[in-house]
Image (tube, rainbow, N blue to C red):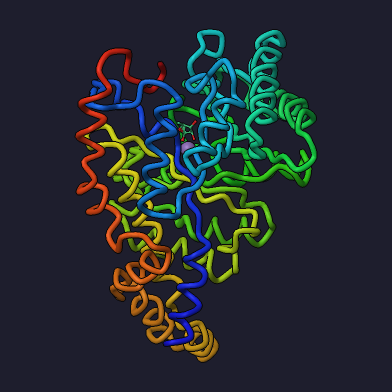
Amino acid sequence: MTDLRAAALAALAEQTIELPSWAFGNSGTRFKVFGQPGVARDPFEKIEDAAQVHRYTGAAPRVSLHIPWDLVDDFSKLAAHAADLGVAIGAINSNLFQDDDYRLGSLTHPDKAVRDKAIAHHAQCVDVMRATGSTDLKLWLPDGTNYAGQDDLRARQDRLADSLQQVYAMLDPGMRLLLEYKFYEPYFYAMDIPDWGTSLLHCLALGDQATVVLDTGHHAPGTNIEFIVMQLLRVGRLGAFDFNSRYYGDDDLIVGSADPFQLFRIMNEIVAADALRPDSGVNFMLDQCHNIEPKIPGQIRSVQNVQEATAKALLVDREALAAAQAAGDVLAAHGALTDAFATDVRPLLAELRESKGLDADPYAAYARSGHQERISRERIGGTQASWGA
Ligand code: LRH
Ligand code: MN
């Protein structure tokens, strides 16, 4: 146990989680987007908020941006602002889901002019990456159809493959395309990249710099997500996670809040494949919306949830597990996982944080800091950032 504990501490010390800039803006549902006091009003303030999460957790040194939500005049100035605050700009997300021209599709659209517009948007995103030093271009394809027969499913795939090839050709060496799938919404009959298999097929057709993004909220209820994690790692094409949790749809709730055992099972596959290492090529990102709860504490809690699931996965006695699996001892094998999952890892994480000169409980430390009250007082006027604005 002691060796496992020491090895877990060493691995956890290197774990980093990338935060989504949009988590610091207002968000909601089609029914209501709620405002909250002190919410960031521009990308500079979003990065200041993300830096608070890193300050207290020590494990969130990157912020992913979304274009055009985070458009600024000078991205090198934004990158310098981030560096001054001890964080860096991570993945750049394109946006193909808020333009009337994309009603019937963007990279899949029957009209070449519309496809060219969507492709050109990625040229803009790659320029942002060159200015911020980002290496990940993240593309979630919102395209789909609502009625059977509405369009030719195969023709859309062929148009998509051609469009993606043009986007892929824009990447500089060292850059990656992260291709995200989603099984439904905003279209309800067929999404053009509905599952990991379709994303993988396109990535394999594109080349080595194309990898799959697994958003934990983008699967049909009951999907065994850790199996997909295992398979994508097995073929070396798991590029990133968008961590969140859900009860029914793409709820974007705090990761691990709805199903902590599922998050543990996912991190167990990561640890089993030795894919937690910083150079594993897997970018662990959050993709969440704090519709009703305060944003910075929500992100701090999220980082802690990922750390806790990871710590439990690192405490699985893999020798005992392998022996039980080889012996066909079903309950002993399952027990090796459930024992680790049942372990209270908060003392281990407190020790990790204290070894980094941080408070043992980041959530409580942030609450004591008075920062939330301060930004609520100071951020008066202007327009709060929100999904879509
Ligand atoms: C789509 C998605 C995608 C982002 C958006 C904010 O549902 O998961 O990753 O572009 O959320
Ligand atoms: Mn996502």
Residue 235 in sight from this viewpoint: yes
The answer to whether residue 250 is seen in the rendering is: no
Residue 68 lies, in percent from the top left, at 52, 19
Decide: is 200 above or below 9.
above
Specify whether 385 is left or right of 13.
Answer: left
Where residue 297 sits, quadrant-wise, is top left
Question: Residue 116's spot in the image, x, y percent?
Answer: 71, 13
Q: Is residue 97 above or below residue 181?
A: above
Tell how many labels: 0
Residue 136 place in picture, x, y as percent: 64, 39
Q: Quadrant of the C terminus?
A: top left
Q: Looking at the image, is 164 positioned above or below residue 344?
A: above
Depth check: give the residue in front, 386 or 114. Answer: 386
Residue at image position (38%, 54%) is 57
Q: Residue at x 29, y 27 (%)?
A: 39
- Rendered location of residue 233, percent (x, y): 62, 59
Q: Nearer the viewer, residue 348 or 164?
A: 348
The N terminus sits in image quarter: bottom left
377 left or right of 179 in image: left
Residue in the picture at 35% in, 27% down: 25
At 39% across and 59% down in the image, what residue appears? 263
Left/right placement of residue 40 relative to residue 365 reads: right
